[in-house]
Image (cartoon, rainbow, N blue to C red):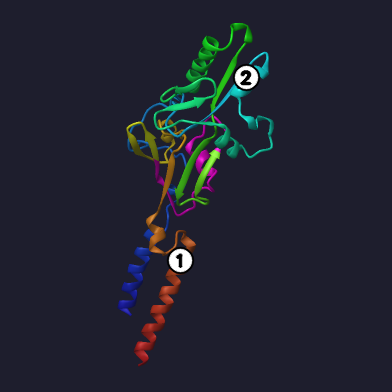
Amino acid sequence: MNRLLLLTGLLLCVLSTSCIPHKDIVYLQEKDKPSDSTQVMVEQQKPYRVQINDILNVRVKALDQETVTILNPAGDGNLNADSAERAYFDGFTVDMHGNIRIPTLGKINVLGFTCEDIEKRIEKQLLDEQFKETANIFVTVKLAGLRFTVNGEVGSPGTITLFQERVNIFEAIANSGEIPVSGNRKEVQIIRQYPQGQKIHTLDLTDVAVMKSPYYYIQPNDVIYVRPLKQKTWGTGTTGRESLTTIISILSLLTTTILLINRA
């Protein structure tokens, strides 16, 4: 009987640590520690600078729209076409040298420039080479959707494209089916590409200070990875009810085994 009590005590200790604490699943808590492993700063949204493999949506308007038809995608008239598909076929992909190739204008280097910079650059080149000021040329350049990938412990892992200017980490995760109880909200990794290579940044989504992080807003081609908690691999239950069920099952098995041994 003493052995049974000892085993029961050990099981209770182990299984009590397997439950996931409430503080580990609540977002944006008040804490005094850094929000990520790289740097903490007051969030200042900076304009995105175009990188390799980005797809740009370029539109040119003028008083006489027929004069700029060649500069605009042929699919503009088919508004019912799938947006992501149109972006891929009608957009201008930034090549490995940082260039896009536009009809009549040729190659234009856009690497490291903002969309506003590219608008001014294209407009200036059109006015210098093809049009007069009276043509009232108006150029718009936008990213053809914000494309990112979410992997790991989320409801629906995969690649997602959102057609909006800014997307924060919570919006990105919400669009991937949320993080289940077994996901580690304290160590969400963002794999981001830079001209010199890729870097990994780690965010603690349970800390309200994450909103001040320079990585709070995701960028095109980001890969978001959510780690599983250790409790998932232990298989002892992630909630108190699951752990209690496991305890009762093991105790019942131990009791039955000991009774059978004593009767033998």
Measured along the vertical axis of the image, is residue 229 above or below residue 136? below
The image shows residue 33 at horizontal and vertical percentages of 34, 37
Tell me the residue at 51%/40% (across/down).
172
The image shows residue 197 at horizontal and vertical percentages of 33, 36
What is the span of residues highlighted in magenta in the rendered image? 162-190
Residue position marked by numbered label 2 in the rendering: 68
Characterize the local packing of mark 1: few (<14), some (14-19) or many (20 or more) Cα atoms within 10 angstroms: some
Q: Nearer the viewer, residue 231 or 262?
A: 231
Q: Amino acid at mark 2?
A: Val
Disc 1 on helix, strand or loop? helix
Q: Residue 211, located in which quarter of the rendered image?
A: top left
The image shows residue 101 at horizontal and vertical percentages of 49, 26
Residue position marked by numbered label 1 in the rendering: 244
Tell me the residue at 68%/34% (across/down).
78
The answer to whether residue 188 is magenta is yes
Q: In screen coordinates, is 50 left or right of 136?
A: left
